[in-house]
Image (cartoon, coloured by chain):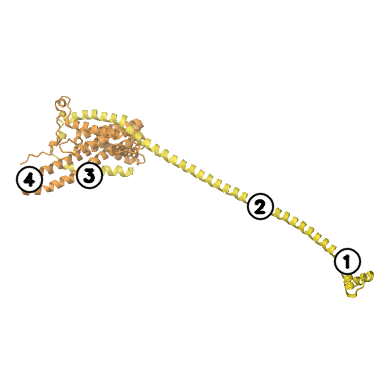
Chain colours: A orange, B yellow
């Protein structure tokens, strides 16, 4: 029987050898550094030539710039320009982290609730600060939308407050659960293949083709999820900032 | 657009999240092992890495790329503008050229008409001049002929008298009486 633990891939260890153990640098932080380096490299190479007619790398850099820029401006409005670098950092960091996690033996740091929770909590905090910065204490009117009959308010205000407070939870759990689930399923199917081969021999090899096909299909799905979840995280951040600035 | 996004994104996300969350309920996830100091400790390093990433992107990369895009946009706008101006200039030049051609054509036609008129007038003058000279010469000639004729006519009776005298002398052999002869001639003439 093959030893199989689909959850071991999420175990945190120290990264960077002995030095990492001293400064509490983990294998997930290692991947974050790689992700940040990839982002800065792509964006850096892209603007090295600064050509009027862009090459491939510059095209990639400009495409990602305009994609996030349009998302921020379309969702938040012109005031959103200030948050563009933040949203871009968030989006590129999560996207590259998701994509790096797809490689075998690489650590997917977006599969950790502590990481996604910290990101989501920061977004929540930022939207609160922006809301109070723009509206002062009138920001509380966010929980009592105008045009609602007074008798509905006792019901509506608690609902609004709960939905507002659940934002960081749903934001973090969504990313964490998607990435974790995909990686667990991958490993479960892969372990199933090994189990079939070791217990059924030649017949098992043929039967193992089914989970192999499933894993291939799952790879395509996980690729989509990596993009989609980064996009969802970024667009929800934009939406929350929009709500803080415009109060619905 | 905004309305649609506000609702379908959370709705889709809830559906995607619901299924896997149920799959491993009850198992001990390493992510939930908060007794492990690494679980929360990785966040500190993430903050450091993200702040560094944010600064390098917001200070250098993003403004530079924004500048490139803005630069291209203004360059394209300037090129389009220049092309528009060139087009207007070309059209104006073409119009001027046409006008110049028209003017030149009109001027040349006027010149041609004038030249033709001049030539006609000169030819007419020449012809009149010639006619006048011919008329004078004709008149002179006619006068000369008339004079010659008068002379000839004046000489005619004398010749007739001589002829008659000689005829009579031959025929009759006598010298005729001059006076009678003249009388006879005169009666014959009339």
Left or right? Give the position of A139 relative to A223.
Answer: right
Q: Earlier in the sequence, mark 2 or mark 3?
A: 3
Examine the image and state in which quarter residue A240 appears: top left
Q: Is mark 2 in CB contact (under 8 Å) with mark 3? A: no
Determine the secondary structure under disc 4: helix
> Residue B158 shows which numbered tag?
1
Q: Work out whether residue A22 or residue B6 is closer to the camera in this orientation and state it.
A: A22
Q: Nearer the viewer, mark 2 or mark 3?
A: 2
Residue under the image location 9 percent in, 43 percent down: A194
Q: Chain letter of disc 1? A: B
Dot 2 and dot 3 within a common chain? yes
Q: Could you tell me how far apart the alpha carbons at marks 4 and 3 are, in whole angstroms? A: 35 Å
Say whether disc 1 or disc 2 marks the residue closer to the N-terminus. 2
Q: How many numbered dots are placed on residues in this image?
A: 4
Residue B120 placement: quadrant: bottom right
Q: Which mark is residue B119?
A: 2
Distance Cα–Cα, label 1 vs label 3: 161 Å
At x 53% / y 44%, what residue is drawn?
Answer: B96
Instruction: Give the spatial CA distance, label 2 vs label 4.
Output: 118 Å
Q: Are marks 4 and 3 in contact (CB under 8 Å)?
A: no
Q: Residues within 10 Å of mark 2 (few under 14, many from 20)?
A: few
Distance from the alpha carbon under mark 4 to that under mark 1? 173 Å
Of the numbered discs in the image, which one, if any, rests on residue A197?
4
Q: Nearer the viewer, residue A91 or A114?
A: A91
Residue A234 placement (x, y as % from top left): 28, 37
Chain of the residue under the numbered disc 3 shown in the image: B
Q: Say few, some or many: other residues with alpha carbon within 10 Å of mark 3 (under 14 / 14 to 19 / 20 or more).
A: few
> Residue A54, image x and y in percent?
32, 38
Nearer the viewer's eye, disc 2 or disc 4? 2
């Amino acid at each position: 029987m093959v030893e199989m633990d689909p959850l071991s891939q999420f175990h945190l260890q120290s990264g960077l050898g002995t030095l990492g153990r001293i400064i509490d640098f983990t294998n997930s932080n290692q991947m974050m550094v790689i992700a940040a380096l990839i982002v800065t490299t792509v964006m850096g190479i892209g603007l090295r030539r600064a050509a009027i007619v862009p090459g491939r790398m510059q095209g990639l850099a400009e495409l990602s710039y305009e994609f996030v820029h349009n998302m921020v401006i379309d969702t938040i409005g012109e005031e959103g320009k200030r948050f563009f670098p933040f949203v871009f950092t968030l989006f590129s960091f999560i996207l590259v982290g998701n994509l790096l996690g797809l490689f075998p033996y690489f650590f997917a740091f977006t599969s950790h609730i502590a990481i996604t929770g910290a990101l989501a909590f920061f977004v929540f905090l930022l939207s609160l600060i922006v809301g109070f910065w723009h509206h002062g204490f009138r920001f509380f009117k966010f929980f009592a939308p105008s045009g609602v009959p007074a008798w509905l308010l006792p019901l509506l205000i608690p609902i609004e407050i709960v939905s507002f407070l659940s934002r960081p939870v749903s934001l973090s759990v969504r990313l964490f659960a998607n990435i974790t689930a995909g990686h667990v399923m991958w490993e479960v199917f892969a372990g199933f293949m090994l189990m079939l081969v070791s217990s059924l021999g030649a017949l098992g090899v043929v039967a193992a083709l089914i989970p192999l096909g499933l894993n291939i299909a799952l790879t395509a799905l996980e690729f989509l999820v990596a993009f989609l979840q980064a996009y969802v995280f970024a667009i929800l951040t934009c939406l929350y900032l929009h709500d803080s600035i415009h109060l619905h | 657009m905004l309305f649609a996004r506000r609702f379908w994104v959370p709705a889709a996300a809830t559906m995607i999240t619901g299924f896997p969350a149920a799959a491993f309920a009850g198992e001990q996830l390493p992510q939930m092992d908060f007794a492990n100091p690494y679980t929360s400790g990785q966040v500190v390093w993430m903050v450091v890495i993200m702040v560094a990433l944010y600064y390098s992107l917001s200070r250098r990369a993003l403004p530079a790329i924004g500048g490139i895009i803005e630069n291209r946009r203004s360059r394209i706008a300037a090129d389009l503008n220049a092309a528009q101006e060139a087009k207007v200039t070309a059209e104006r030049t073409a119009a001027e050229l046409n006008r110049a051609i028209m003017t030149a054509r009109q001027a040349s036609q006027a010149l041609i008409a004038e030249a033709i008129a001049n030539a006609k007038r000169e030819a007419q003058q020449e012809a009149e001049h010639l006619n006048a000279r011919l008329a004078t010469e004709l008149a002179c000639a006619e006068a000369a002929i008339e004079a010659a004729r008068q002379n000839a006519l004046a000489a005619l009776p004398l010749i007739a008298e001589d002829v008659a005298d000689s005829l009579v002398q031959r025929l009759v052999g006598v010298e005729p009486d001059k006076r009678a002869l003249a009388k006879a001639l005169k009666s014959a003439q009339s």
